[in-house]
């Protein structure tokens, strides 16, 4: 006959287990940076566009080294969104997984930090049926994702870290296009603990996480969408620079765009600021060049007149740098265009601007030195239209088109 443990011992074991987990380093996680792409992802319905968001994590204090596993996810609304299925995942050209348990789904992209540490998704179920109501908002689907690495992992500290970005197909033609998303806390976190969620390190310790996107779910995209971004594209150029271009189909109270660049996918720096059209109901095209090229991540920051900020999806490219390059910005221009010339020699020439009939409008003598040269060409007196800028000396090739708007 088997002997049963006294109830007091069972309670003691449970208490010790809970206290061990509760005394571990505490973390926080959240969903942030909603994005939107107005293009119909499969031209078939019921999806009409795509939207996304980023999952971030940090510690409340101190740091946790050698993190090797995170089990987490998010909850969403099947009436407003769907997991990409039966077509190409936007921007990747990869067949998306849909509502199946799979590994490394195409619509979930790891940040550079976690990818570099060897993390993978061995198992993801994005459509687990789990109905929850949070402040009158009903969520009927929960994603459960296991994120692991076979290396020594990485360190999580008090600085917010991007873990992964998620793309979903949106069903709605009005905001919020893909409804709302939220994330539960881990087993002993708050609020809304979910027993499957936790963080582990190489030593086998388990760490809890509080959720900052539970009581106030995230709308994807944000409730007001002043700018409809229809394209954000990054391409390598023959001169080894990187061309960053984007188009909008609508702009309302749009102040400016800022192209941001990162070499690691985590730390971002402003590459260039471009004045927006303000208010527009027609397609607008923008383009800048990153003369330095190289392997990098790019994203677009859009700022409203009231200061509200929205980020695009992140695009990675690798354009080998070189010592001689020519680039021009902003495009389109209003008052000034800046010509950047990187040269391996010194030369005197003239920068000449021609209109679309071949007439020279500006002739500006310049001295180009070895290294990086910046020349500001005044165009405030030019009529709206297309122009081309060339150099008068064949020793340095300048041949750039630009647009002036009024």
Image: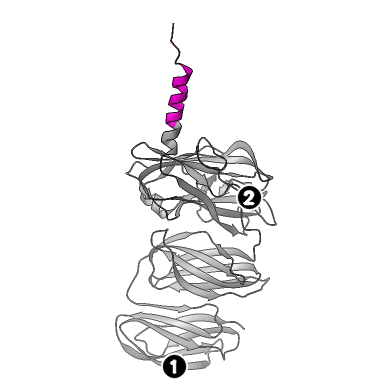
Density class for disc 1 (Cα within 10 Å; few <14, some 14-19, many ≥20) is: some
Where residue 318 sits: x, y (%)? 39, 62
For the point 40% across and 73% down, the residue is 291
Q: Main secondary structure of the magenta part?
A: helix
Horizontal and vertical percent position of residue 160: 45, 55
Vertical relation: 50 (above or below) 370: above
Assign the C terminus to one quadrant of the image: bottom right
Q: Secondary structure at mark 2?
A: strand
**Residue 26 in the figure: left or right of residue 368:** right
Q: Which of labels 1 and 2 is toward the front?
A: 2
Question: Counting residues from the N terminus, which is met first, the one under dot 1 or under dot 2?
Answer: 2
Q: Tell me the tag on residue 391.
A: none
* Residue at 48 percent of width and 48 percent of height: 28
Contact, CB < 8 Å: mark 1 with mark 2? no
Q: Which mark is residue 180?
A: 2
| C-alpha span from label 1 to label 2 | 55 Å
Residue 364 versus residue 150 in the image, above or below: below
User: Which residue is depicted at the point 44% across and 16% down?
Assistant: 5
Residue 368 visible to the viewer: yes
Q: Which residues are magenta?
A: 1-17
**Residue 184, x across and y down, in percent:** 55, 42
Q: Which residue is mark 1?
A: 364
């Amino acid at each position: 006959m088997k002997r049963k443990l006294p109830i007091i011992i069972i309670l003691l074991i449970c208490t010790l287990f809970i206290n061990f987990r509760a005394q571990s380093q505490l973390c926080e996680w959240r969903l942030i940076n909603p994005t939107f792409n107005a293009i119909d992802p499969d031209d078939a319905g019921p999806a009409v566009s795509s939207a996304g968001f980023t999952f971030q994590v940090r510690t409340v204090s101190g740091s946790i080294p050698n993190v090797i596993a995170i089990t987490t996810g998010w909850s969403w609304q099947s009436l407003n969104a769907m997991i990409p299925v039966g077509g190409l995942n936007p921007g990747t050209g990869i067949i998306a997984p849909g509502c199946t348990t799979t590994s490394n789904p195409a619509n979930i992209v790891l940040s550079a930090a976690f990818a570099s540490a060897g993390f993978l998704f061995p198992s993801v179920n994005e459509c687990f049926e789990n109905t929850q109501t949070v402040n009158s908002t009903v969520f009927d689907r929960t994603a459960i994702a296991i994120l692991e690495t076979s290396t020594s992992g990485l360190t999580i500290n008090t600085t917010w870290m991007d873990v992964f970005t998620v793309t979903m197909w949106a069903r709605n033609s009005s905001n919020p296009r893909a409804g709302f998303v939220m994330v539960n806390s881990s087993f002993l976190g708050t609020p809304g603990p979910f027993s499957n969620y936790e963080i582990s390190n190489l030593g086998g310790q388990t760490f809890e996480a509080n959720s900052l996107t539970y009581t106030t779910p995230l709308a994807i995209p944000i409730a007001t969408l002043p700018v409809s971004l229809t394209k954000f594209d990054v391409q390598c150029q023959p001169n080894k620079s990187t061309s960053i271009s984007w188009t909008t189909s609508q702009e309302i109270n749009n102040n400016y765009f800022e192209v941001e660049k990162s070499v690691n996918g985590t730390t971002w720096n402003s590459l260039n600021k471009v004045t927006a059209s303000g208010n527009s109901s027609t397609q607008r095209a923008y383009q800048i060049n990153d003369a330095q090229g190289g392997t990098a991540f790019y994203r677009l920051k859009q700022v409203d007149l009231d200061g509200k900020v929205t980020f695009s999806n992140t695009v990675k490219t690798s354009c080998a740098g070189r010592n001689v390059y020519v680039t021009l910005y902003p495009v389109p221009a209003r008052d000034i265009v800046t010509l950047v010339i990187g040269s391996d020699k010194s030369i005197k020439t003239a920068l000449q601007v021609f209109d679309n009939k071949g007439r020279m409008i500006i002739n500006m003598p310049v001295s180009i030195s070895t290294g990086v040269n910046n020349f500001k060409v005044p165009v405030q007196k030019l009529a709206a239209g297309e122009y081309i800028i060339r150099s008068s000396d064949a020793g340095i090739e300048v041949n750039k088109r630009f647009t002036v708007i009024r």
